Amino acid sequence: MDALQSSIAAASAGLEAQAKRLRVAAENLANAQSTGATPGADPYRRKTVAFATASDHDTGATLVKIAAIDADPRPFELKYDPGNAAADAKGYVKYPNVNPLIELADMREANRSYESNLQVIKQARDLISMTIDLLRSNS
């Protein structure tokens, strides 16, 4: 396959990876204040995304893919709130290990990467169309 098609394949894989990354960051953000259902229970645990590279044998392109979506091992935040239904015997409530600022920054970075990959696809399609037009005009 030619270089333009390889570029489209690589950018398409990037779009898919960044879309999943956005979904995970949005899920983390949505659950940032979730507590456990019972006293002392663990709350939502932040998820992290790990990327890896893969080779596309059809196009020869090196692609990005999601290697894993794992739970963040960082500890939960403890807050003293004895009136909360999720409080343990000592009055502490476990809150998720989600930092909304980190999630928003991750969403912004993923969004920019998504837009960059989309622009690559648009440019490659334009170049393919221009090449076809040139070949038609020379015939």
Image (cartoon, grey):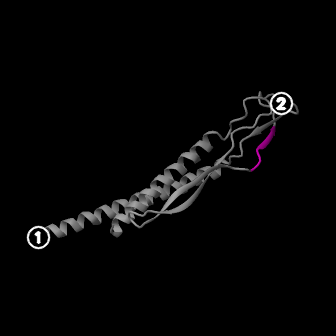
Residue at horizontal 85 percent and vertical 33 percent from the top:
91
Label whose residue precedes the other's in the sequence (2 or 1): 2
Give the magenta range. Answer: 74-79
Above or below 11: residue 34: above
Q: Is residue 49 left or right of residue 82?
A: left
Q: 43 and 115: which one is in front?
A: 43
Work out which residue is located at the far right of the displayed protein and give it.
Answer: 90
Q: CA distance from mark 2 to mark 1?
A: 81 Å
- Percent of width and height locating residue 83: 81, 28
Q: Secondary structure at mark 2?
A: loop
Amino acid under disc 2: Pro
Q: 13 and 34: which one is in front?
A: 13
Magenta segment includes 5: no
Residue at horizontal 59 percent and vertical 50 percent from the top:
104
Work out which quarter of the rendered image holds the N terminus and state it: bottom left
Which label is found at residue 139?
1
Q: Secondary structure at mark 1?
A: loop
Work out which residue is located at the far bottom of the displayed protein and give it.
Answer: 138
Which label is found at residue 74?
none
Residue at horizontal 77 percent and vertical 27 percent from the top:
85
- Percent of width and height locating residue 9: 40, 60
- Percent of width and height locating residue 130: 23, 66
Task: Give the labeled residue for mark 2.
Answer: 82
- Percent of width and height locating residue 112: 49, 57
Magenta segment includes 75: yes
